[in-house]
Amino acid sequence: MGRPELLGSSGLESNDREVDKRYTLLPLRKLDLARDSRELYQDLSAYYNLLTNPKNRIHYANPPIDASDLKQRLLHDRTHTYLSENKLGSTVAGGGINDAAENEHDHFLVKVVIDPELQGHGMGRRFIAGLVDKAFHERTDDGRIRTKLDAAIIRDVPEWDRMPRALRSLGFKFVHYLPNQITIVDQESGVEKTQPTERWEILREDWMRMRRRIDIRDILSQLQQ
């Protein structure tokens, strides 16, 4: 998953400009789950729609039943949730940082999802880079510095192998493989089945070195514009 070529606007046909806008991520926005507003409901609904799209939900166990259920789960799980739009104004990416309990250090990337129509163009890698940078530059609610970030991947479902490639390219290291680790519902049969998982991690100091690389700097600068 190499860094994609981002089209400039000079000399482009209008159709090319639309493609550029479609695949360009805007800076990540953190959801304020404590507020109760129409804007928050719209954000949660957009995130819920991404998570429960048939092409995405196979990558998650026990998906939420609606936007309200999603909000309650995020609040209960100590998850800092971020969304990103493209330049056309569509919510195209979402994900969270699930913080470890007090005196623990296993903070996880969770519920990372990209609009299925836009997958395969490097957007997932860019969004994950933004999430990782947020995790290591912001503190937990109780003031802790995150020293490590983990990610768990459900294996052997369609296109599961995209995530390991993205994580590896961002400096994550493989930790272990667990057979029959998690239960999901088969989308075709509706039958529950167990799937193996992989666990990956990156240390804070390793990310600080990674973010000095030209390609990572380019991604982060685009997300800060």
Image: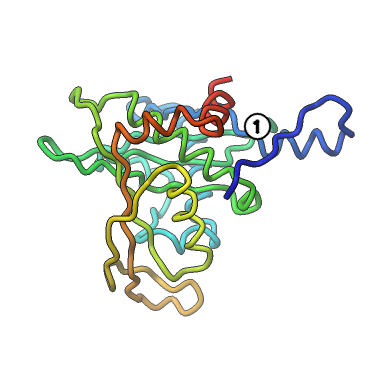
Colouring scheme applied when the structure was drawn: rainbow
Estimate the x, y position of residue 197 in percent, counting from the top left: 33, 64
Give the crowd class for mark 1: few <14, some 14-19, many >=20 residues within 10 Å.
Answer: few
What residue is at 44 percent from the left and 60 percent from the top?
59
Q: Nearer the viewer, residue 219 or 113?
A: 219
Instruction: Give left or right: position of 151 versus 162.
Output: left
Residue 167 shown left or right of residue 2 in the figure: left
Task: Identify the residue at image location x=55%, y=23%.
Answer: 221
Q: What amino acid type is highlighted by mark number 1?
A: Gly
Q: Return the x and y of residue 47 as percentages of the image width and height.
A: 49, 43
Extreme-left residue of the structure: 103
What's the residue at 36%, 40% (across, down)?
A: 71
Q: Give residue 42's position: percent from left, percent from top.
A: 52, 35
Residue 37 horizontal/vertical position (percent): 44, 26
- Choose between 219 and 60: the one closer to the eye: 219
Relative to 118, residue 128 above or below: above
Quick one: SS at disc 1?
loop
**In what quadrant of the picture does the C terminus appear?**
top right
Q: Report how many numbered discs are placed on residues in the image.
A: 1
Outermost residue toward the top?
225
Q: Quadrant of residue 40?
A: top left
Viewer-closest of 155 and 56: 155
Q: Which residue is disc 1 drawn over?
A: 89
Asked if residue 118 is positioned above or below residue 135 in the image, the reply reads: below
